[in-house]
Image (cartoon, grey):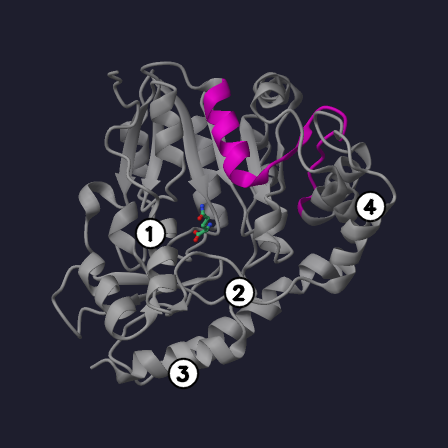
Amino acid sequence: MQHTSKLPNIKTTIFTVMSDLAQKHQAINLSQGFPNFECNSELRELVTKAMADGFNQYAPMPGVFELRNEVSKKIERLYDAYYHPENEITITAGATQAIFTAISTFVYAYDEVIVFKPAFDCYEPAIELSGGNVIPIQLKAPEFDVDWIEVERNVTTKTKMIIINTPHNPTGRIFNEKDLFELQRITDGTNIIVLSDEVYEHIIFDGLKHQSVCKFQGLKSRSIIATSFGKTFHVTGWKIGYCCAPKELMDEFRKVHQFNVFCVHQPSQIAFTEYLKEPKHYLRLNDFYQQKRDLFLDLIGDTPFKFIPSQGTYFQNLDYSEITDENDVDFSIRLVSDYGLASIPLSEFNVDNLDFKTLRFCFAKNDETLKRAAEILNKIK
Ligand code: GLN
C-alpha cells in the first residue's frame, strides 16, 4: 500500500522528544511546559464530586452553560469586554484543539496565514493540513520585538489570518498596548481574522498588564481567543480550555467543533464552574510564578548564561553563547545526557531552525527541583 504524507516535514513534537529523553536519562525535566506540583485539592474534590453526582455523560456541545457564564463574567471583569455565554464562548479540549478547530474552520487552500517565529509548534501543521500557506515572520533574539512595518509588508489580498501569542511561548515576551494598536491598524478595513493564543494570560510579571485582543474594539470583532484552564489551574493533563469570538465567527467555529470533539469532559466543566467563582484562584498566579522565576534567576545569576527575565509564561530562555559554539539541539542533548537536565532548543520554533544559542527552561516546578536544576547550570562552564 502506498500513501503520501500530508505532513512530510513534520517529526514528533520536540516536547515529546525532550520529555522522553529526560525520562531515559532520569534527568530533571524543565523541557515540556507542565507543573510538577499538584493542583489545589479543592479543585480535585470538585471534579470527584461532579462524578459522584452523576455528571458522567456528554456535556452540551458548546460546553456547560454555567461555566460559559462564569467565563463571560471573568472576561468582563478583567478586560471590560463582553462575550455572550450562549453563542460567543465554547469550551474546548485545551487551547490546541481550539487553535486546530479555528484554523480548520477558516483557512482555505492557498490562503496565507502570518505566523511570528519562534512559534509554538501546533500552528503550522494545522495551516498546512487546511492547504494554507504559512507566511513566517522571524523575530530576533534577545528582544523578539515585532517590526509592524514588516508585518504590513507581508499582508496581501490572500492573508486570511494572523496568529499572535501573548504572553509568548517560547520567548517569555509580551505584546504591549502599542503592538495591539499596530495590529488593529494593519487589519483595519480587511477581512483578516486574528487568532490570539492567550493561554498564559494569568502568568505575567513585574506589574505588566496582559493585553488581550478583546480590549481593542477593532480587534475583538475579528478575533478568536484561545485559552487554557490547564495552564492556569495546574492541570495540563485535563486538556480543557475555552475559546471566545464574536457570534458570526463562533457559529462557524462550532460547525467544526461539533464534529471535531463534539464536547469535552463534563465533570471538569462542573468543577471549573465553581472554582472560577473565586477570582483569587487565577489572580494570584502572577505572584506565584514570579517568585519561581526570580528564584531560578537568582540561583543562576553567577553563571555564564545570559538572559532577559521572562515577562510572562512559565518559561525562561537562557543564552549559552559564552559557554560553547555548539548548536542548540546538540547542546540540549548534551545537557540532558551528560548533566541530567532537560530543556527545549529554541531553534525548533524558528525559520530554517535559526540558532540563537538559546534554550528554553520551564520553571513551573517546585522550588526543590528549581534548586537542583540551578546547581547543574552552575557546574557548566
Ligand atoms: N505548552 C507546552 C510547552 O510549551 C507543551 C504542550 C505540548 O506538549 N503540546 O511546553
Labels 1 and 3: the sequence-earlier one: 1
Q: Quadrant of residue 256?
A: top right
Q: CA distance from mark 4 to mark 2?
A: 34 Å
Q: CA distance from mark 2 to mark 3?
A: 18 Å
Q: Quadrant of residue 379?
A: bottom left
Q: CA distance from mark 4 to mark 1?
A: 35 Å
Q: CA distance from mark 3 to mark 4?
A: 42 Å
Residue bounds of the magenta highlight: 79-105
* Residue 345 appears left or right of 220: left
Labels 2 and 3: the sequence-earlier one: 2
Q: Amino acid at mark 1?
A: Val
Residue furthest left as drawn: 325
* Residue 187 appears left or right of 222: left
The structure residue drawn at horizontal position 35% and vertical position 33%, both measured from the top left corner, is 124
| Residue under label 3 | 299
Labels 4 and 1: the sequence-earlier one: 1
How many marks on residues?
4
**Looking at the rendered structure, which numbered label has been put on residue 17?**
1
Label 4, residues with CA under 10 Å away: few <14, some 14-19, many ≥20: some
Q: Amino acid at mark 4?
A: Ala
